[in-house]
Image (cartoon, rainbow, N blue to C red):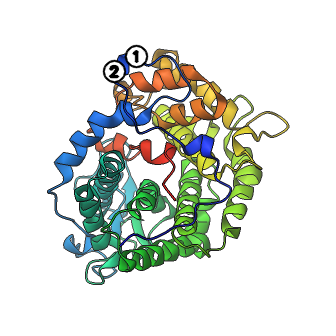
Amino acid sequence: MSISRRIFCTQAAEFFTAGIILPRTLGAQTSTARPNVAAIDHGRVLTEAQNYLTISPVPITALACKRSPGTLHDFYSEADDYWPNPAGAYVERQGAANPAAFTAHRDALLDLSIWVPALTAAFVLTKEERYAEQALRHLRAWFVTPDTSMTPDLLYAGIVLPAKVGRFEGILETVHLAEVAQAIIFLADAEAFTKADLDGLTKWFGAYFEWLTTSQLGGLARDQKDHHGSSWLLQTIAFTRLHLELLPNADDAPLSELRHHYKSVTIRAQINADGAFPHELTTRNPYRLSLFNLDMLAAVCLLLYTPFDSVWDYDLQDGPGMRAAIARHFPYIKNKAAWPYMADAMYFDDLPLRRPSLLFCARAYARPEYADLWKTLPANTDIPALQRAFPIRQPLLWVTRPKP
């Protein structure tokens, strides 16, 4: 059953419209700020989606941990950079991850965020229902079916033993649901999408939005001046947009409030006048986290844009804004050897990957050199630590406008 959706009235077509007709050869494409993402990613998307067609859902109810203070439905994870200490509480040890830390829920959610968008992108390209049906199997298991669905909060995420409550850092583990929310918007066009799916998914993501915006842990994540704050902002915006797309009478006031937060808080707290992210530069992995933050803020600008209020062009009086941030980082994505700060402690040689911020900013600022670089970079990685800092894998779902 197809569900009609309201197209968010302030959404700009120029930022979301992308042709799905494939050219005869990719080699014929010239330098452009608006590359044909459908053509570029066509083979990759279908190869990935084909691999995921037979994978069964793995909801968190299938991954129990005896140390969890919650129920089978409660997301639970332990900080893997903390290790046992004979003197008492666990202590932070930078470097290799603690293999005894429970991360199965985090890893399963990451898998979900890889499988569902890939299957959805294949559905967008081919209109074959089998891809949508498989994506919906996963979504139902995680968010709709009462026996297997996850509780819409993160009370027990990122725990440092022997504590029994989570930390705001745990909210970073669901940042990949932003792309899952983008996927759901397209799946609403599938024949397999039912009224029960509509009700269940809007209820779950609405409840999780409420928790993120009203809980103490959500408030702590919101107020961080680094990628944690960006993660909170991207998630809340994505879930608001999902609500607006699926429910014709939904209130769009939260989106205006989040736009105000970006303009009045995020830019000032996170971006220097020269476009750098100072709070990422003091970490052990400044390059990885700077690019991670750049991607999230570019996605924030894309989702917040309206023809009447372009956050892409919003700058503070002393200079910082998204334009400055991409201009600052572009040379270091193009030539990592030019990075003027400390190299990452781990996986520096495996970066930068195909950053979605390059594509989004190319379109926003009419800068073909950003898109040209984006096309040359590797689209995938098998390194879990890098996957967790790569929030958008299917840009087709972000630059294509869903049909009315």
Secondary structure found at label 1: helix
In the rendered image, which quarter is residue 382 located in? Answer: top left
Decide: is 311 above or below 73.
Answer: above
Residue carrying label 2: 25
Q: Which residue is mark 1?
A: 28
Left or right for 48, reference 321: left
Residue nearest the viewer, comparing 247 with 302? 247
The reply to whether discs 1 and 2 touch (Cβ–Cβ < 8 Å) is: yes
Q: Position of residue 268 (x, y in %)?
A: 74, 45
Tell me if residue 340 can be seen.
no
Specify the amino acid type for callout 1.
Ala
Extreme residue in the right direction: 317
> What percent of the width, then of the height, locates residue 264?
77, 53
Which amino acid type is marked by label 2? Thr
Q: Residue at x 64, y 50 (%)?
A: 225
Q: Quadrant of the N terminus?
A: bottom left
The answer to whether 76 is drawn above or below residue 115 in the figure is: below
Q: Residues within 10 Å of mark 1 (few under 14, many from 20)?
A: few
